[in-house]
Amino acid sequence: MKEQYQIAVELLQKLIQTQSFSSEEHNTAAIIEDWLEDHGVSFNRTQNNIWAVNKYFDENKPTILLNSHHDTVRPNKGYTNDPYDAFIEGDKLFGLGSNDAGGCLVSLLSTFVHFYEQKNMKYNLAVAATAEEESSGPNGLNSILEILPEIDFAIVGEPTEMHLAIAEKGLLVIDAYAKGIPGHAAHENTVNAITNAIKDIEWINNYKFSKVSDQLGKVKMSVTQIKAGELHNLVPAECHFVIDIRVNEAYSNREVFEIISENTQSELKPRSFKLNSSSIDKGHPLVLAGIDMGRKTYGSPTLSDQSVLSCNSVKLGPGVSLRSHSANEYILVSEIEEGIRLYKELLSKIL
């Protein structure tokens, strides 16, 4: 009989071999449906999101959500391998989405199946294989939160080397428009939008938010794009620049936006306030269980579907974050085996 991790690896190979760019995940959703059906799991599908609850679900018990995504970014130009080949060389399983976050997804699905028919658990288990995580799109995990049972706690599968990310920075992106008075560069009766933008950018570069997190450090602001002017002899009426802000758990995205607005002159348009930071107390039972197993805790600078959850959550999964979105992406087969083992051990301590 095949080991559980071998079955999970075969599922991951099928997923890698099937294109699943964000908002184009219908084929991988079908593969996950077939896999759950083969394992006797009753499931639901909402657009390209597949979700299920344990066989003996009890609405009087709290519920733990196991979540990861099956969409991918597009392969970058640095690939020398076929990104859809899903071949194994030694311990390495190559392919687009193998590390981010296919290894996490198949490990969580395997863990859910392991507990699916278990009776008399203290918690319910729900699992959700979701879409549009990479694009922060409208039809991903956020779109099914009102359909899922009430979630008390979530494990979000992203590559963390199976250590517990107990805090995660939020993301706020702002389009800023500095205004001016257009005119010929030779004339004096102009107000230069670029000069006005520079003043605001200097404030952004120099400002330090007062609240610094033990886990996530400071709020970080970066101006990442700028555009103005069409002709060398025409002072532009407007300068557009983009601010990328990584927010610690001491602030909401809206609070950060208000501070920036009070200190700059440009017109500011936030793209979304939804991608907030997240954190969990180190004394939470699952965190304590992980520490007892020798797992480390840390704060993560990268964004995940934790940002759309209002419940306590940790980010935890096999794989290495630095491999995500890289050319010739891979995950170790041994990492998947370890991921399933540690997920099961961790949940067994509290279920």
Image (cartoon, grey):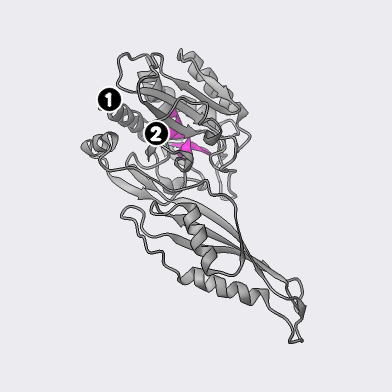
Q: Secondary structure at mark 1?
A: helix
Question: Which label sits on residue 154?
Answer: 2
Left or right for 303, reference 210: right
Circle 2 packing at 10 Å, graded few (<14), some (14-19), many (20+), is many
Residue drawn at x 57%, y 58% as measured from the top left: 174
Q: Label 1, on which residue?
A: 348
Closer to the chain start, of discs 1 and 2, is 2
- Residue 310 figure quarter: top left
Q: Is residue 96 magenta?
A: yes
**Quadrant holding the N terminus:** top left
- Residue 148: give x, y in percent of width and height: 49, 26
- Residue 98: give x, y in percent of width and height: 48, 37
- Residue 156: give x, y in percent of width and height: 42, 36
Looking at the rendering, the stretch of residues picked out in magenta corresponds to: 93-107
Q: Is residue 92 magenta?
A: no
Above or below: residue 56 compared with residue 194: above
Which amino acid type is shown beneath numbered disc 1? Answer: Ser
Above or below: residue 210 compared with residue 187: above
- Residue 36: give x, y in percent of width and height: 49, 18
Q: Is residue 94 visible?
A: no
Circle 1 packing at 10 Å, graded few (<14), some (14-19), many (20+), is few
Which amino acid type is shown beneath numbered disc 2? Answer: Ala
Residue drawn at x 44%, y 61% as measured from the top left: 220
Q: Secondary structure at mark 2?
A: strand
- Residue nearer the viewer, 159 or 205: 205
Q: Main secondary structure of the magenta part?
A: helix
Residue drawn at x 38%, y 17% as measured from the top left: 58
- Residue 91 figure quarter: top left
